[in-house]
Image (cartoon, rainbow, N blue to C red):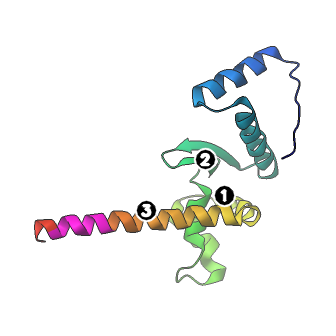
Amino acid sequence: MPVVSIRFSDEPLHRRLKASAHRDNVGVSTLAERLIDEGLRMEAHPMVLFRDGPAGRRPMLVGGPEVADVIGTIVGGDVPVPQRRSRAAELLGVADVLVDAAMAYYADYTDEIDADLQRRRELADEAEAAWRRQQELLGT
């Protein structure tokens, strides 16, 4: 594991980093690594940012949905390939440029987004199975 030492010339920045790590109950190095990774990703993909949510930290489009939401709309389905981009934009109510930004991010982080989509499918299947069991108990 590579080791990098960082010296902060801005003491208030260092205090904020430590306070945030304490709040999140993570190490300062862990938080710094996450923030650097996200910062580099946002620099490469300016229309993507990161937000915390119920399922953890996710890449989101600026002013739009999660990247995985867009990709889930584009990949597969019965819409002909040439129409998927515009159809996704229409269904999600976003500009084509946001669909393009999601596709560019997906091209760089395919495995990560595919894993997120797979997890979503599994959670949906589990929720449906639980609902069906409840319906059986109710006799419907």
Q: Which of marks 1 and 3 is nearer the N terminus?
A: 1
Q: Where is residue 110 in the image (x, y as percent from the top left)?
A: 70, 66
The residue identified by callout 3 is 123
Q: Earlier in the sequence, mark 2 or mark 3?
A: 2
Q: Is residue 61 above or below residue 133?
A: above
Residue at left 55%, top 65%? 117
Q: In this view, does 140 lie above or below 119?
A: below
What is the chief secondary structure element of the magenta stretch? helix
Q: Position of residue 53 (x, y in %)?
A: 52, 44
Give left or right: position of 70 versus 46: left
The residue identified by callout 2 is 63
Viewer-proximal residue among 27 and 127? 27
Q: Closer to the observer: label 2 or label 3?
A: 3
Q: Position of residue 94 (x, y in %)?
A: 58, 58
- Which region of the structure is painted magenta? 129-136
Q: Residues within 10 Å of mark 1 (few under 14, many from 20)?
A: many
The residue identified by callout 1 is 98
Amino acid type of the residue tagged 3 in the rendering: Leu
Disc 1 + disc 3, Cβ < 8 Å: no
